[in-house]
Amino acid sequence: MATNGKSGDNRRHGAVRNRSQIQIASGNWVKRDTDTGRFMDVKTSNDAPFKGVRREK
């Protein structure tokens, strides 16, 4: 997993491991576990992608 570094700097150090994300037709981003291929979470709060999670092509 990625570390958060110093307290209060509001940024992540490094990428989140074993995770990827894709954008679905509705415009929402879906986070996926790369080990099992299962979908884990859908971000519906806004159209921005998850932070620190790599994108699939």
Image (cartoon, grey):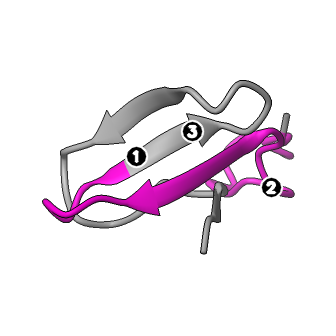
Q: Quadrant of residue 26?
A: bottom left
Disc with the residue nearer the chain's start (1 vs 2): 2
Q: Position of residue 14 (x, y in %)?
A: 86, 57
Q: Is residue 26 above or below residue 57?
A: above
Q: Is residue 54 above or below residue 50?
A: below
Q: Mark 3 falls on what kind of element?
A: strand
The reply to whether the C-beta atoms of the residues labelled 3 and 1 are less than 8 Å apart is yes
**Residue for point 24% across, 56% down:** 28
How dense is the environment of label 1, judged by Cα within 10 Å: few (below 14), some, or many (20 and up)?
some
Q: Is residue 38 above or below residue 56?
A: above
**Residue for point 76% across, 45% down:** 16
Q: Disc number at residue 32? A: 3
Give the magenta part as a residue range: 2-29
From the viewer's perspective, is the residue at label 3 or at label 2 nearer? Answer: 3
Q: Disc number at residue 7? A: none
Q: Mark 2 falls on what kind of element?
A: loop
Q: Quadrant of residue 18?
A: top right
User: Which amino acid, by three-letter code, is at mark 3?
Assistant: Arg
Determine the CA span between mark 3 and mark 1: 6 Å
Q: Quadrant of residue 54?
A: bottom right
Q: Position of residue 40 (x, y in %)?
A: 48, 26
Q: Mark 1 falls on what kind of element?
A: strand
Q: Which residue is mark 2?
A: 15
Disc with the residue nearer the chain's start (3 vs 2): 2
User: Going by the image, does 7 lie left or right of 26?
Assistant: right
Q: Nearer the viewer, residue 40 or 14?
A: 40
Q: Nearer the viewer, residue 20 or 57?
A: 57
User: Which amino acid, by three-letter code, is at mark 1?
Assistant: Val
Residue farthest left in this picture:
26
User: Which amino acid, by three-letter code, is at mark 2?
Assistant: Ala
Residue farthest bottom in this picture:
57
Q: Which residue is mark 1?
A: 30
